Image (cartoon, rainbow, N blue to C red):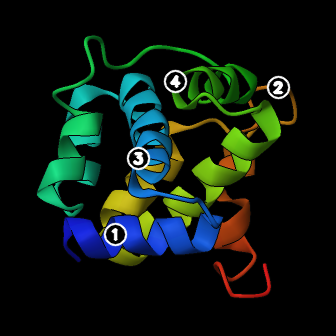
Amino acid sequence: MDFDAFTGEIQHRLGLPGTGETVRAIRATLMTLGERLPEGQAADFAASLPGEIQWYMTGAVHEHGRRFDWAEFVDRVSEIEGADRADAAYHARVIVDLAHTVVPPSDFQQLRDALPESEDDEDWRNLFEVVDSGGWSEHS
């Protein structure tokens, strides 16, 4: 999938008015994931994404492997994207769902394995809600 197809699909799924808002949502989600993941895992995950988007998880990140929970992830995405927390969380879920369709299963599983699935505020299962419910559809 190339850059235009990826961003066009995200724009459609999120109902965003323009490419600028769409790219901002993608950048916010992937940069923040890149900060959370170890550098090698971020690079592996990003390798299957369009070239213009890979950079958000790798080159745009100054420090990989940071420890923060789901709530802080949403706060960071919200701030970078300039969206409220609920929208930022939903956008991240939809972006991860589309990435799930282009990233090899082993690299996607690495992402899941790198994020804790506990019952407290670290519960990263929230990020995978769209994937785990069967993926995005027109009726989501």
N-terminal of the pair, mark 3 or mark 1, is 1
List the residue tagged with mark 4.
Answer: 80
Alpha-carbon span between mark 3 and mark 4: 13 Å
Circle 3 packing at 10 Å, graded few (<14), some (14-19), many (20+), is few
List the residue tagged with mark 1.
Answer: 6
Kindly state the secondary structure of the residue where label 1 is placed: helix
N-terminal of the pair, mark 3 or mark 2, is 3
Kindly state the secondary structure of the residue where label 2 is placed: loop
| Percent of width and height locating residue 127 | 66, 49
From the viewer's perspective, tell me whether residue 128 is left or right of residue 25. right
Mark 2 or mark 4: which is in front?
Answer: 4
Badges 2 and 1: C-beta atoms under 8 Å apart? no
| Percent of width and height locating residue 89 | 71, 43
Q: Which quadrant would the C terminus be assigned to in this image?
A: bottom right
The picture quadrant where one finds residue 30 is: top left
Residue type for callout 1:
Phe
